């Protein structure tokens, strides 16, 4: 086994930890983790970049993190570069844009600081309330989402759908909150989950009185699921590929710095959040 941690594995683990509201402040306050995530915005692997963005998006859910994140060296510039880079997949640009908007509009007023403590302790409701009109949130109640094996199957099914931006699981209640492009039908998610043969999804919506209503997807739905076949298997590529990939500038250090941070992150994960 290699003695060097794998970039995607470490970033994915940090992303999963950031999904828990109770971990978000500690991750941002830890020396090296936030700057390391920014460094991976320039990683050659699109999956690493997207996973790092997803981790940062989770961290930005905590109001008290936003000023520090906005002021972190390279954060805003890196997000802008992802948004403007011709080789960035469409959903990666969209996610970077949402993070940029949140941090750009952040404020350190006393009112928000008072709200921060409660915000960091609430159950994760990822992307609910986002103002980006090019995307929408769908909440799925998934029968059969019982353990990590089923979760992995569900992840694989969702990652193949063209138009899925991000998702997070609430395993305790067997739910998945999915962020998708506004032109993608929710039924496509149900079809993808059903394709696992061991799980079935229903959509959770709010009624007029605020109560939750669970709506089953039609079993004979003819919705065609457009898949990512020749692209990174977690999001689509809206733009034509170009030869600019190797022109990315690493602003926070060299590739060796990235490797060093991987070791730091691995130690941090073990030291602070090992379960």
Image (spheres, grey):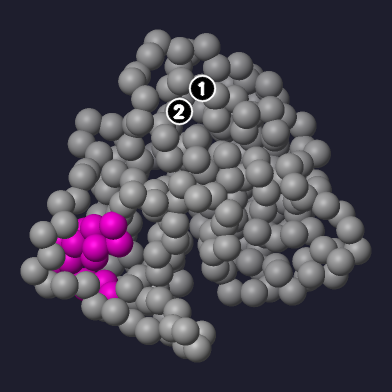
Is residue 261 among the parts visible in the rendering? no
> Which residue, given by chain and number where applicable, does mark 1 sit on?
85
- Judging depth in this view, the residue of 66 and 223 nearest the camera is 223
Location of residue 46 (image quadrant)? top left
- Judging depth in this view, the residue of 73 and 115 nearest the camera is 115
Residue at 40%, 64% (x, y): give it.
Answer: 138
Which quadrant would the N terminus be assigned to in this image?
top left
Residue 101, placed above or below residue 215: above
Where does residue 108 sit, x and y in percent of width and height?
87, 54
Where does residue 177 sit, x and y in percent of width and height?
43, 65
Q: Which residues are magenta?
A: 185-202
Residue at 91%, 63% (x, y): give it.
Answer: 110
- Judging depth in this view, the residue of 71 and 131 nearest the camera is 131
> On the picture, is 84 further left or further right than 202?
right
- Contact flag, marks 2 and 1 (Cβ < 8 Å): yes
Q: CA distance from mark 2 to mark 1?
A: 6 Å
Where does residue 90 sit, x and y in percent of width and height?
42, 35
Mark 2, secondary structure of its residue: loop
> On the picture, is 16 further left or further right than 237?
right
> Which residue, given by chain and number where applicable, does mark 2 sit on?
88
Where does residue 150 sit, x and y in percent of width and height?
28, 67
């Amino acid at each position: 086994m290699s003695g060097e941690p794998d970039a995607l594995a470490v970033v994915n683990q940090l992303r999963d930890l950031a999904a828990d509201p109770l971990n978000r402040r500690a991750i941002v306050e830890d020396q090296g983790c936030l700057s390391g995530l920014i460094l991976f915005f320039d990683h050659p692997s699109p999956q690493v970049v997207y996973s790092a963005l997803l981790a940062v998006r989770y961290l930005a859910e905590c109001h008290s993190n936003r000023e520090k994140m906005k002021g972190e060296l390279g954060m805003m510039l890196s997000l802008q570069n992802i948004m403007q880079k011709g080789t960035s997949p469409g959903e990666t640009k969209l996610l970077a844009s949402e993070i940029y908007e949140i941090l750009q509009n952040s404020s350190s007023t006393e009112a928000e600081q008072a709200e921060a403590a409660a915000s960091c302790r609430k159950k994760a409701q990822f992307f609910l309330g986002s103002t980006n009109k090019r995307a929408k949130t769908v909440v799925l109640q998934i029968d059969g989402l019982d353990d990590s094996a089923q979760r992995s199957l569900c992840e694989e099914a969702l990652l193949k759908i063209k138009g899925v931006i991000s998702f997070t699981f609430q395993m305790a209640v067997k739910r998945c909150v999915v962020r998708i492009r506004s032109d993608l039908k929710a039924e496509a998610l149900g079809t993808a989950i059903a394709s696992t043969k061991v799980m079935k999804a229903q959509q959770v919506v709010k009624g007029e009185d605020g109560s939750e209503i669970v709506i089953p997807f039609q079993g004979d739905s003819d919705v065609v699921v457009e898949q990512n076949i020749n692209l990174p298997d977690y999001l689509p590529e809206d733009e034509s590929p170009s030869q600019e990939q190797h022109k990315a500038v690493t602003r926070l250090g060299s590739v060796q710095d990235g490797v060093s941070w991987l070791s730091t992150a691995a130690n941090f994960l073990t030291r602070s959040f090992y379960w």
